[in-house]
């Protein structure tokens, strides 16, 4: 079963605590994905871990749960948030200081093209050149991050395989696994998607990346788990690729919750319905099992308490993925 890490904001912990659904979120989600934002910058400036900051600032006790953090695609935003340049070493130091379980390496999200705003990407004069820069520069940055992570004892570094062509993907995959395997026996490797709806070509490149990571893990004697970055839809990959993925982060569960929509499984298919329609379906998710939280799930208004629909959406997505994972080939 693929574990879903919904992309959240720090304030989601606060509202989840206030309205009683934070525990349900931690129970339903495989983990939670954060990106640079003001509250994280405040915690870093105060020299507090994320959990310490939430407790002292908001009285929120974040017990358990796996927290993953991405560096974000905007270098300027990162620098403004943490008041320091966005460099490979600084990113690792922030992950360590905030006590994040898993921190995504400083990659170039090549599928975003010019939208990456990455200084290294600006050198590319073509898509082909951008793909090679993403692979080579990503490996260089990963080496620097791995050295720093080993020095300060941060064991949650997550390399990212990037590339738009098979040979670049192969290079990125091998270098990612090799660099990590020199320091750790087991680790997670991410595959980038660009956070958009996948085309058949995108899906094929992801398949190549996943298979490459597995092959190089065997070559270097590493135990790996594969994480998919920014997976927008579970319907976009073939079954054999899905079965190889351990976890994936996605904006979709939270985004649909805020829109007043929720997922249901009907006739073996995943459907998106209005919140008020969920009452026609039975659900055993941590939110729907609680009468009070269930009332929030069904409330179509945009009140923050109703963001508990995110819990329902994560649970249903994971149940759907589990069902197709077990489908005979």
Image (cartoon, helix red, strand yellow):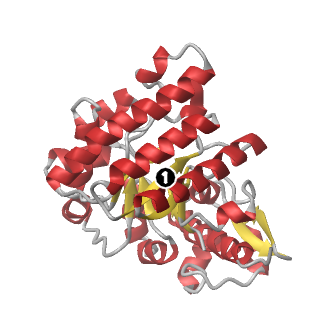
Q: Residue at x 50, y 46 (%)?
A: 173
State the image coordinates of residue 176 (x, y, percent, origin top left): 42, 47
State the image coordinates of residue 5 (x, y, percent, origin top left): 50, 62
Q: Residue furthest right?
A: 267
Q: Residue at x 27, y 72 (%)?
A: 61
Which one is in front, 203 or 41?
A: 203
Q: Check disc 1: other Cα within 10 Å, few if <14, some if 14-19, many if 20+.
A: many
Q: Is residue 153 left or right of residue 179?
A: left
Q: Residue at x 28, y 43 (%)?
A: 145
Which one is in front, 246 or 293?
A: 246
Q: Residue furthest front?
A: 219
> Which residue is labeled 1 in the image?
190
Give the quadrant of residue 68: bottom left
Q: Residue at x 40, y 63 (%)?
A: 222
125 versus 141 height, above or below:
above
Give the quadrant of residue 267: bottom right
Which one is in front, 221 or 48?
A: 221
């Amino acid at each position: 079963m693929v574990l879903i890490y919904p992309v959240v904001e720090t304030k989601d912990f606060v509202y989840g605590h206030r309205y009683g659904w934070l525990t349900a979120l931690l129970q339903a989600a495989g983990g939670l994905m954060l990106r640079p934002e003001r509250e994280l910058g405040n915690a870093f400036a105060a020299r507090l871990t994320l959990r310490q900051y939430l407790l002292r600032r908001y009285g929120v006790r974040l017990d358990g749960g796996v927290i993953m953090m991405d560096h974000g695609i905007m270098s300027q935003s990162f620098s403004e948030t943490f008041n320091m340049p966005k460099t490979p070493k600084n990113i690792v130091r922030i992950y360590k200081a905030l006590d994040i379980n898993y921190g995504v390496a400083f990659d170039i999200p090549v599928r975003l093209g010019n939208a990456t705003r990455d200084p290294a990407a600006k050198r590319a004069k073509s898509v082909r050149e951008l793909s090679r820069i993403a692979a080579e520069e990503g490996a260089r940055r990963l080496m620097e991050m791995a050295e720093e992570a080993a020095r300060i004892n941060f064991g949650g570094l997550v390399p990212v395989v990037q590339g738009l062509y098979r040979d670049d993907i192969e290079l990125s995959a091998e270098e990612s696994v090799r660099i990590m395997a020199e320091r750790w026996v087991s680790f997670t490797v991410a595959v980038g998607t660009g956070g958009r709806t996948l085309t058949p070509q995108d899906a094929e490149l992801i398949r190549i990346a996943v298979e490459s990571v597995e092959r190089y893990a065997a070559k270097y004697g590493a135990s790996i788990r594969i994480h998919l970055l920014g997976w927008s839809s579970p319907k976009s990959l073939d079954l054999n690729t899905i079965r190889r993925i351990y976890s994936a982060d996605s904006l979709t569960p939270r985004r649909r919750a805020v829109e007043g929509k929720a997922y249901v499984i009907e006739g073996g298919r995943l459907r998106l319905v209005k919140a008020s329609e969920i009452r026609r379906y039975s659900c055993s998710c941590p939110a729907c099992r609680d009468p009070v939280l269930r009332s929030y799930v069904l409330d179509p208004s945009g009140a923050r308490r109703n963001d508990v629909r995110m819990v329902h959406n994560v649970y249903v997505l994971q149940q759907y993925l589990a069902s197709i994972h077990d489908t005979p080939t």
